[in-house]
Image (tube, helix red, strand yellow):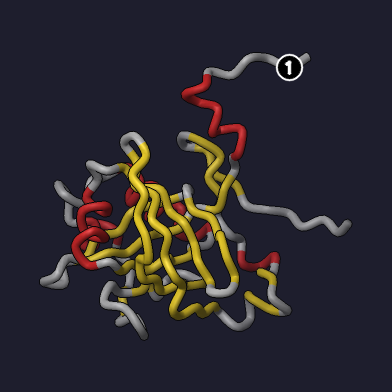
Amino acid sequence: MKTEIDLAESYRLLHPRPVVLICSADRSGKVNVMACSWITPISDDPPLIAISLWLKGYTHKLIDETGEFTVNIPSVNLLKQVWIAGTKSGGKTDKVKLLNLTFTQAKAVKPPVIENCIGVLECKVKNKITINEQALYIAEVVKAYAEEELFKDKVWSMKANILHHAGGRIFTTIKYIKA
């Protein structure tokens, strides 16, 4: 028997979802990090992704200002940092200091990449659609790289332990099964 789900919570039926760390920066170079699971690929030629951000959020402000961001793929060992990045506002807290992560220069965009993460997408915004209180950014992936020993044959190894957000304080990793 199926139960009715409150429509405001219906998106949770699509979880667990991979969670990533988005790095953005203002024009002066001040960096912010946020946790994001509302992200999806939308094209492979050219490579495009979409992320959904709250219009009043600090990350939205920075991406609007510069048109660039990085998507950093954490493994389970960064759970604490992911939680902090997703529950603190960069407008009120210097998350770069708080998270104790290592940042390095990106190859093609100004916001940095997180060296502690196992994969990176460097992105430039192509379009923005405003829907209610959300901004849907369509961005082109201009560089992509991953830890060689964890990403083989176009798929993550089980050793990668990619972090997924189930809802609230609940996270998980995946177990592969073959069809």
Identify the residue shown where x is 31% and y is 36%.
Answer: 133
Q: Between 55 and 102, which is closer to the camera in this rendering?
A: 55
Other residues around mark 1 within 10 Å, as few (<14) / some (14–19) / many (≥20)? few
Seen as rendered, the residue at the extreme right is 179
Q: Quadrant of the C terminus?
A: bottom right
Residue at the far left: name it: 28
Q: Say how many tags the image has.
A: 1
Q: Name the residue at 53% across, 18% down.
A: 6
- Tell me which residue sits at (46%, 73%) in the image: 141
Establish if 167 lies above or below 50: above
Residue in the picture at 39% in, 75% down: 115
Judging from the image, what secondary structure is the residue with disc 1 in? Answer: loop
In the rendered structure, the answer to whether residue 94 lies left or right of residue 52 reads left
Return the residue at label 1.
2
Q: Indicate the position of residue 87 as horizontal and vertical percent values.
A: 32, 42
Along the line of sight, the residue nearer the viewer: 10 or 170: 10
Q: Write down the quadrant of residue 41 in the picture.
A: bottom right
The residue nearer to you, when weighing 90 against 128, is: 128
The N terminus: image quadrant? top right
Residue 169 lies, in percent from the top left, at 46, 37
Residue type at mark 1 is: Lys
Image position of 110 with respect to 164: above or below: below
User: Nearest the camera: 119 or 81?
Assistant: 119
Question: Horizontally, is 16 left or right of 88 in the view?
Answer: right
Q: Where in the figure is residue 27, as x and y percent of width and height?
A: 14, 70
x then y, percent, for residue 142:
44, 78
Residue 57 appears in the figure: yes
Rendered view: 27 above or below 32 = below
Q: Is residue 170 left or right of residue 149?
A: left
Q: Is residue 129 left or right of residue 29?
A: right
Q: Is residue 80 visible?
A: no
